[in-house]
Image: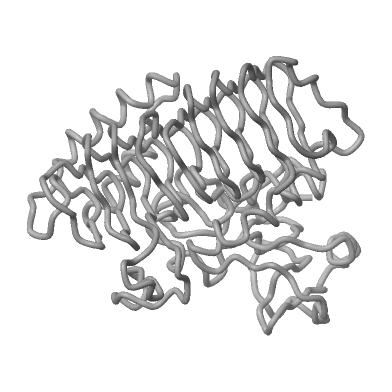
Amino acid sequence: MQLVFSDAQYWEDFLPLTFTRPVAEMRCGILTFSERWQKILENAEISFFTEMYLQGKFPEPAKKESLFLVTNFLPTENVIQQIKDLKQGEALVYEDELVAAKINMDGFSLHQIEKMTDIKEELIFFKKPTDLFTYNKEAIDFDFALLTKGRVSQELSSTNGFLGNKEDLYIEEGAQIEFSTINTKTGKIYIGKNAEVMEGCNLRGPIALCEESKFNLGAKIYGATTIGPHCKVGGEVNNIIIFGYSNKGHDGFVGNSVIGEWCNLGADTNSSNLKNNYAPVKLWNYRTKSFEDTGLQFAGLIMGDHSKTAINTQLNTGTVVGVASNIFKEGFPPNLVESFSWGGFKGDEKFKLDKAYEVAERAMARRKVPLTDEDKAIFKHIFDAY
């Protein structure tokens, strides 16, 4: 059965994180939404119902019987069973929104749906970027149970200090942890395959350090934090998510933030997550083209893919950075840094598209990942449209 992962109405609400990906490819907890649903439903055949300019990279649905699914929520066991039990022409609805349907993608139409059932349980639904870090603890707990059920963790080296319950720590094969402190009293800690926690780190869960990623010497990590695959993180972080392939390798603080892929924060980059007057934080909303109140007292940085900061960069509370931006000028940049900004300030020239390709290609080559023609087409669309 083909799984069709739909952005539904949420794609624009997650910008700038979704400029370069469907909603299903965002990471929260340990897994991306698509990885989570593939694991839950034990199905590897996936496609995406997303923006046209993204379909070149993310495959369109084949015209056949499919399970159409909105992915950005955490299901209960009962809802999972309801999804598995769907028959052709049946659908599940949550808060008046379609979340799952068994339909034929040949001539896709909601008219195929003959029966709709309301989900009565309260679900954790991710509707905007700040929800990713706000509900990251719940996502880590969900994925921890999903990934570790029936499996045995590698042993924690005796050089480490440990607080909490051992069943709340899971270490995958090939991971290394030496001379650090690990505290699971406040939440579960998952250390991915071939990940490394260098000497002198202090980890206070819930934390997910994904495959091939590293906490650098002396890092201070507060939960709920997720570091996606192939990242390096140092300094102090608190309740952040990095999707993958990005580095914050040096001292400096980042809190209550979401950072995309292929980003690099220069040494001593700091991002404020609390206003001096303790007022709720506003963030730029690409749909309404205005700054909107998040209702949160703590909110730091939302950064799209391939963006970078120079050493000693200082970011204001509630800063949104687009795709392929370069922030390097003196002083605090504005709370909205546009995609392809060369400098980080309003009115700065644009980062030339051919140069953006070059930098991305070099950065990705370090991880043996090619910059494809499809990636370049996505870059060009963002460059031209935004």
The quarter of the displayed image where residue 189 is located: top right
**Residue at image coords 12%, 60%:** 346
**Residue at image coords 37%, 54%:** 301
The quarter of the image holding the C terminus is bottom left
Q: Which percent across, then down, holds residue 281?
A: 38, 71
Q: Is residue 234 above or below residue 18?
A: above
Q: Among all residues in the image, which is located at the extreme bottom? A: 96
**Residue at image coords 18%, 55%:** 333
Is 339 displayed left or right of 194 in the figure? left
Is 252 displayed left or right of 209 in the figure? left
The quarter of the displayed image where residue 30 is located: top right
Query: Which one is in front, 42 or 277?
Result: 277
Q: Which percent across, then down, holds residue 91?
A: 78, 74
Q: Which percent across, then down, holds residue 188?
A: 73, 43
Tally of numbered tags: 0
Is 167 displayed left or right of 12 in the figure? right
Q: Which percent across, then down, holds residue 64?
A: 72, 56
**Residue at image coords 36%, 33%:** 251
Is 4 displayed left or right of 25 in the figure? right
Q: Is residue 289 above or below residue 304?
A: below
Which colour assignment does the render follow?
one colour
